[in-house]
Image: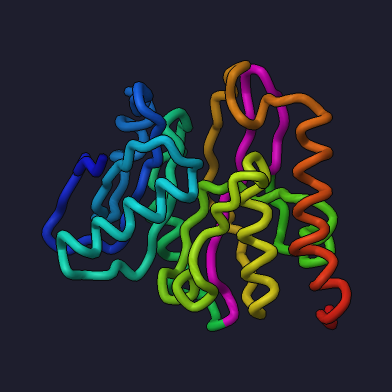
Amino acid sequence: MFNIIQKVNAPDALVVTPLLPGHKIFRDTKINLKRCDLAFDWVSYVGHNNIPANATLGLQEYIKRFSKTPKYMIMIDRDIIPSRNMLKYMFDTLENSSEEVAYCYSSFEFKGAINARFVGLEFDPLKLLESNYISSNSMIKIDKLQEIGGFVIDQDLVRLLDWALWLKFLHYGYVGVLCKSSFFTAISSPDSVSARGREDYALKYGRVRDRFVRPLLDGLVL
């Protein structure tokens, strides 16, 4: 189900929040994200799908309804606390980026069931081949996303679908860039995908390595 949270006359970017049935966007997420000097549309898509699959459906419905493809989009989880003007800083970063840049990402931290920080990590393809340090809450150039065939939505990769996406971009020769002025906190609950056990992580990690990392190691010159 497609819902419009915010619609403006001349949006610079689109925010899509994928939701499972029964889930709602946190009040603090709404308040803090709207504390922004950027004009943006915000929609959600509710469905029994994984996060990027719902985001894909939300983007498709947005384009269908408004007959316009946004220049940039960002998936925003329902439970993050963004820093003030996070979207504006990310937008500015992409506006001033080179052609090889497909997305920009922020420093962030997990609090709750998981406690971890990913702060000030510059883009490094070799490090990305080892593990993910880039959040799914990253702003993406839509034309680059369409060029690579869209989000990775394989159900058997849930938990590491964002890592698979950044590796997919790398396969096509695109990189990311750190937005140094933005930051967010992700609230990690015990039932969240990120809080699943080590066995689940190892299983998904092996699958991503087989499908995305190994082909890059075989054919990419870094």
The residue that appears at 36% across and 33% down in the rendered structure is 32
Between 38 and 143, the residue placed more toward the observer is 143
Quadrant where the N terminus is found in the figure: top left
Q: How many marks?
A: 0
At x 43%, y 43%, the residue is 76
Q: Main secondary structure of the magenta part?
A: strand
Q: Determine whether 14 is above or below 81 in the image.
A: below
- For the question of whether residue 93 can be seen, the reply is no
Name the quarter where the C terminus is drawn.
bottom right
Above or below — where is 85 with respect to 179? Answer: above
Give left or right: position of 18 versus 61: right
Q: Position of residue 97 (x, y in %)?
A: 52, 75
- Residue 100 seen in the figure: yes
Q: Position of residue 28 (x, y in %)?
A: 37, 25
**Colour scheme of this structure image?**
rainbow
Q: Nearer the viewer, residue 170 or 37?
A: 170
Q: Position of residue 77 (x, y in %)?
A: 45, 37
Residue 192 percent across, percent down from the top left: 58, 25
Left or right of 28? Residue 168 is: right
Q: Which residues are magenta?
A: 100-118
Between 109 and 23, the residue placed more toward the observer is 23
Q: Is 67 situated left or right of 222 in this image?
A: left
Answer whether residue 68 is magenta in the image: no
Q: Quadrant of residue 35?
A: top left
Query: Farthest right residue?
Result: 218
Q: Residue furthest left?
A: 9
What residue is drawn where x is 63% and y is 42%? 158
* Horizontal side, residue 35 vs residue 6: left or right: right
Residue positioned 39% across, 59% down in the render? 73
